[in-house]
Image (cartoon, rainbow, N blue to C red):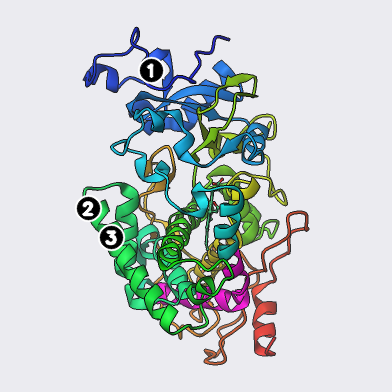
């Protein structure tokens, strides 16, 4: 196994193609004979490129990012965990990346928006990380999680009311992408009518379109105005709690962390909801297990976090010193790609990819170590409760096209569905405060989540019900079984 060292960033003069040569740019192999993680081959099948790298180099492989910037792709499950859990050797501070220092990965690099250093929890370490992250987690600790689930339920039903009379919908654009933004704006204490514009702006920023800078400015201006308002007049929300943390964040720091939370939550949770819905609609394994009661919605969400993690990789981690990882010699200043998707399918931890991962939460979807996602319970709650509400309201929902016609948008960072067109029986809207349950009898399908469905029942009006999805579980806890719909209805009726 010969491994050209990616420790020297930039292109190898001897093998580098002439700049701008279209024949070379479209090739899957770039400078130094290394595989590219971008371009036509990677766009078509990045997971396949990772598997070739794994076969050729083992759990840590040299590869190329855009502009043929060298990086170590960390493919092994334990190697990824070791990297994120060893802050003495690896940092998220991109100013230490030699490709940034020598300008190879400059501000014009296509991935610059995700690796350019900013004074935020994601890029700092040590005492400064503790100060900024501590403020975020301190503010999160004050959130009323039961209340949030109630709101997730309410927003889900609002979105379902918008589509239920039409009998068809695109569950990506009309549900998965809307729900996390509505919930997060509520958590931040921002007015609901921001939602549509924020979804558009956030999408635009992430896609890196020509208007991305203007969209980012729109989001930052809206957040900064909100911070100024809450500084003057605190309310019971995440923004006011963040301002009140002992870390005493400045207005700019508060706005930057609201943006971090909003964008992290929006993009990842929208992907998660779309992926779970697609699996439920297309994968016979899921249908059978959900209909047979061997799998709950939270378990389906967890399986999706293994099979299709919302962020497939992150750019990245940077070596603080010369070291070894997965048998490779890593030099101080080298960049490393946190390989979430390839780590999740590492044959060392998953010899059989078809095997059910039920009860096993050791996937890399939320990373690990000091930067591990602090919002994972909120992300899970939005996905669990949203998917649950949708399947309860539209139990006859079916894919409107052949699965092979579904379009995907791929990048190194994530792979997500463009649309999820579905059909279902038309039904009237519901009181949004009510339990998510259709009172129109619906023909049963073999994959319904609960059994048996209750008889048509007078529409409850008040009070707003308690959340229906189980609370997030501790890592080692046995999965909580989802109660049957009849039992849940009775519990609601009795006021539990
Ligand atoms: C399914 C949904 C989500 C997924 C898959 C996800 C995943 C991730 C990942 C992979 C990271 C990077 C960790 C690293 O740098 O090693 C991260 C960081 C972060 N996430 Fe999430 N996330 C999700 C939802 C959320 C939500 C809902 C929030 C807020 C309410 C949130 C807030 C954050 C923050 C603040 C960080 C930076 C933490 C730090 O650097 O210390 N995330 N997330």
Is residue 452 depicted above or below 172 in this figure? below
Q: Is residue 321 depicted above or below 131 in this figure?
A: above
The answer to whether residue 439 is seen in the rendering is yes
Q: Which residue is located at x 67 percent, y 78 percent? A: 488
The image shows residue 485, relative to residue 411, as above or below, that is: below
Q: Which of 57 and 446 is in front in this view?
A: 57
Tell me the number on the disc at residue 29.
1
Question: Which tag, 3 or 2, sits closer to the chain's start?
Answer: 2
Q: How crowded is mark 2: few (under 14 residues within 10 Å), some or many (20 or more)?
A: few
SS at mark 2 in the image: loop
Q: Give percent across and percent down for residue 246.
A: 59, 70
Q: Position of residue 248 (x, y in %)?
A: 53, 68
Quarter residue 114 falls in: top left
Q: On the rendered image, what quadrant is the C terminus found in?
A: bottom right
Q: How far apart are marks 2 and 1 (CA)?
A: 31 Å
Residue at image mark 2: 211
Q: Upstream in the sequence, badge 2 or badge 1?
A: 1
Foreground residue, 292 or 76? 76
Q: Which of marks 3 and 1 is nearer the N terminus?
A: 1
Q: Which of the 4 quarters of the picture holds residue 446?
A: bottom right
Q: Where does label 3 land, which residue?
A: 217
Is residue 496 within the magenta segment? no
Give the image location of residue 211, x and y in percent. Answer: 22, 53
Q: Give the range drawn in magenta.
A: 137-161
Give the class, few, some or many, for how many residues have Cα within 10 Å of label 3's Cα (few <14, many ≥20). Answer: few
307 or 398: nearer the viewer: 307
Quick check: marks 2 and 1 in contact, CB under 8 Å?
no
Q: Given this view, does label 3 or label 2 mark the residue nearer the observer?
A: 3
Element class at badge 3: helix
Residue 467 visible in the shown view = no
């Amino acid at each position: 196994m010969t491994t050209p060292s990616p420790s020297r960033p930039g292109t190898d003069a001897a093998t580098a193609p002439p700049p701008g040569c279209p024949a070379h740019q479209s090739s899957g192999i770039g400078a130094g004979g290394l595989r590219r993680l971008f371009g036509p081959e990677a766009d078509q099948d990045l997971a396949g490129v990772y598997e070739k790298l794994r076969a050729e180099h083992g759990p840590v492989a040299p590869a190329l990012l855009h502009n043929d910037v060298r990086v170590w792709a960390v493919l092994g499950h334990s190697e990824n965990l070791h990297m994120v859990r060893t802050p003495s050797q690896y940092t998220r501070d991109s100013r230490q990346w030699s490709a940034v220092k020598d300008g190879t990965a400059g501000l014009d690099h296509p991935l610059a928006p995700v690796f350019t250093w900013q004074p935020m929890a994601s890029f700092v370490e040590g005492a400064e990380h503790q100060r900024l992250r501590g403020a975020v987690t301190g503010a999160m600790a004050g959130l009323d999680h039961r209340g949030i689930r109630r709101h997730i339920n309410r927003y889900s039903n609002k979105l379902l009311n918008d589509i239920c009379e039409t009998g068809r919908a695109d569950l990506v654009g009309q549900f998965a992408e809307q729900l996390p933004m509505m919930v997060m704006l509520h958590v931040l204490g921002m007015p609901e009518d921001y939602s549509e514009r924020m979804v558009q702006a956030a999408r635009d920023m992430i896609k890196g379109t020509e208007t991305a800078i203007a969209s980012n400015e729109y989001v930052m201006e809206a957040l900064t105005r909100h911070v100024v308002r809450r500084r003057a007049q605190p309310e019971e929300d995440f923004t006011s709690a963040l301002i009140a943390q002992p870390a005493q964040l400045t207005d700019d720091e508060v706005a930057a962390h609201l943006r971090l939370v909003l964008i992290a939550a929006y993009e990842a949770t929208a992907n998660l909801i779309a992926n779970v819905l697609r699996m439920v609609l297309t994968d016979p394994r899921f249908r059978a297990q959900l209909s047979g009661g061997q799998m709950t919605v939270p378990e389906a969400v967890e399986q999706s976090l293994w099979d299709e993690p919302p962020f497939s990789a992150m750019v990245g981690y940077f070596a603080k010193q010369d070291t070894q990882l997965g048998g490779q010699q890593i030099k101080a200043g080298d960049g490393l790609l946190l390989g979430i998707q390839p780590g999740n399918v590492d044959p060392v931890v998953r010899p059989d990819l078809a095997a059910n991962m039920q009860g096993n939460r050791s996937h890399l979807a939320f990373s690990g170590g000091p930067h591990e996602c602090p919002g994972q319970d909120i992300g899970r709650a939005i996905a669990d409760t949203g998917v649950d509400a949708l399947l309860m309201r539209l139990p006859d929902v079916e894919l409107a096209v052949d699965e092979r016609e579904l379009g995907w948008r791929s990048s190194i960072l994530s792979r997500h569905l463009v649309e999820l067109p579905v059909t279902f029986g038309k039904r009237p809207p519901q009181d949004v405060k009510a339990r998510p349950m259709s009172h129109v009898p619906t023909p049963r399908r073999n994959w319904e989540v609960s059994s048996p469905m209750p008889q048509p029942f007078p529409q409850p009006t008040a009070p707003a019900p308690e959340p229906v999805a189980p609370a997030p579980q501790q890592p080692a806890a046995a999965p909580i079984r989802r109660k049957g719909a009849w039992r849940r209805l009775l519990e609601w009726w009795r006021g539990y």
